[in-house]
Amino acid sequence: MLNFYQILRYNNKKLKRSGVLRFLLNKRLISFIITLQEAFVAVIPFIIFTAFLTLLNITVDYFNINIIPKETLSEFTKTVNSFTSLVATVSIAFFTARRIKTSEVITILLAIVTFITIYLYENPKFPLVLPYGFTAAAIFSPIFSAFFLKLFYPKLSLHINISDGNYHIYRFFNYIFVFFAAYAATISLYITIDEVMDIIIENFNPLNLDLPGIVTLAIRDFIVQIFWFFGIHGEHMTNALFGKEILFEQMLPNLTYGEFHRIFINIGGAGIGIALFFALLLEAKNSTVKKITKISFPFVIFNINDILIFMIVVFNRFLFLPFVFLPLLNLFLAYVFVHLVPVHFTDYKVIWSTPIFYDGYMKSDSYLIPAFQMLLIFIDTVIYARFIKRYYEIQSIENKKHILQNNLEIEDEIRSKKDIKAFLANQEMIEANTKLNEIINDLNEVNLKIYYQPKIDIKHNKAKKFEALIRYNDNGQIKGPFFLDIIEKSGLAPIIDIWVCKQVKKDLQMFKSQNFYPEISVNLHPDTLKSSDAVDKVIEIFENENVMFEIIERSFVDKEAQENIEKLKYHNFPISIDDFGVGYSSLETLIKHQFRELKLDKSLIDEIESKRGFIVCKNAIQLCKDLNIKVVAEGVENKRQLEILKSLDTDYVQGYVFSAALPPEKIKLFSENFDMNSL
């Protein structure tokens, strides 16, 4: 199914235009899901602590340990567990507020107040005892609190000036009326939804239909897994909505449906935690995930799998199918087994925390049941492992490289890079992969454009040189390449560079048909220069073309990059040093390497009107003159800067003082009509 999903998502252009898929791949929907994932990842330490307390309680009870008073430990565990929903509320509120850019503190306070109000509305009892586990209100309250704060702030804020030293005080005063309006809206919406749900459940409760017990159990388990997938404690929520009578009904002599479920379905906890545990050990590629998986082992043995669920399953669309449907597969196989194989069950009472295998043996007084449990775990582990393997393959940077190549219609001519970077920390990986997924799925030849910024020869009053720059078409609005930073960090820059070269080649052919022969400068990323395959492809694309390559200085640090730069020179491509004066700027580069041109970075030009800035620029330009290197001043924005650069004998000027980057169809006209004196 994942293979089909991947093909559906990345390769079928017709299906990409379908309404359902557009909804599933919607940026806001994905961003919302990732926000919730971040929130649940953030509460994992608390989940581990509550799981530890629960395990400690079970151990003390099983082995009758008297070091810790049982009642004290039990009450302490219940108290800590009662804060689970509140902790989730705070975490979701913080991450949601951060995502939609509203006040985190106000959102958290509002979410807590609405959560408590909702719980009192549902359970009007005092003193207040918070619910155990993650509830629907714990997700609803923070999300809608943040949404309504964002919605009402422009209209209801006091708009007090917050520019002085009392910023934090004034900022909160601005939220006074916004807070109460958002509170009222959130509570009203919840009550409305609750009333509607009550009507639906009252008129159609799938667990109250006259169905066979095993079918009712299957429907119940399906609902439980759905709730768990969305971060809500499935058992508690399903019991609250539909009751749990089916669990106490007799399925076979001495075997209730609840015991059948605990022995064969919930092996290791909801979603078959023990199989998920083994599958993660086998296939997880992230060191953080593996460490937490190992920590979860003693908990899974006693059917406590909250750690695994909130670490890897919640809102993970790649694991939705196995998490929801494997318990149903187990249910079917176990139902067939107990009716075909002559097994007799004892009167031993199986409770939820009874360890796996031990529960099967004690309930049957036979090794046949534990053996069948082991078979189920094996089947479930194999299936989980397949999905987890595909999940990490799809998350891998190498896979994103192929997707980007496909989107930009670049054949696989560049071998895999040796030093593709990995996003290591789990929470950072979620965020980074989300941004990268959004970017990669957006980039294609429709919305990625090449514009050209003139490099003006101010000595001869000519506009014959242009720099190729990437631009992004956002629904008709042309923007700069905001995505380059994460693309570069992910090791995918060579794919972008090859695409740029191909587009420039097409434009050069168009210019020739117009009898127009400009010199085009193309930027090459250091990662591209490290790849001999990529540089060979660039040379092939631009053979016999009037192209200059702009290279930043740190490219010269790498030996392989230096060799590839020399290869470009050998094929008669001139080299320009880009961004000189910032970051890695070495005079040694000017001594050891020859190139035609040097570009003074905009940060230097911005300071040229100051005394110190003028001295630095003057001496840098003079140094280039002495070394017979042409000087380009980039980022020139006003006439005063231009006049100073003229007085310093600068060769070329690039910047808004003359023109922003232009689409390819406009640069011929610009070149022919250019007159610097008309400024």
Image (cartoon, rainbow, N blue to C red):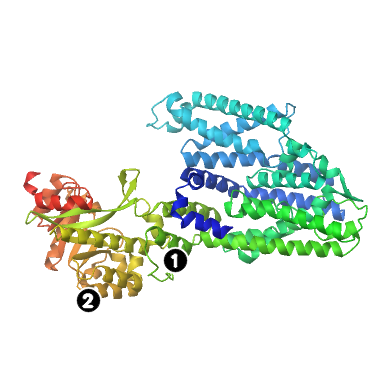
Where's residue 35, x and y in %?
A: 53, 45
- As helix, strand or loop, the secondary structure at mark 2 comes to helix
Residue shown at 46% from the left, 27% from the top: 174
Where's residue 129, x and y in %?
A: 73, 33
Question: In the image, 14: left or right of 276?
Answer: left
Q: Residues within 10 Å of mark 2 (few under 14, many from 20)?
A: few
Name which of mark 2 and mark 1 comes first in the sequence.
1
> Does 3 appear above or below 143?
below
Question: In the image, 583: left or right of 101?
Answer: left
Q: How many marks are shown on the rendered structure?
A: 2
Residue to which mark 2 is pinned = 570
Residue to which mark 1 is pinned = 420
Taking depth in this image into account, of 428 and 475 the one nearest to the observer is 475
**Distance (Cα) linking label 2 and label 1:** 28 Å
Q: Is residue 663 visible?
A: yes
Image quadrant where one finds the N terminus? bottom right
Q: Amino acid at mark 2?
A: Tyr
* Quadrant hosting residue 546: bottom left
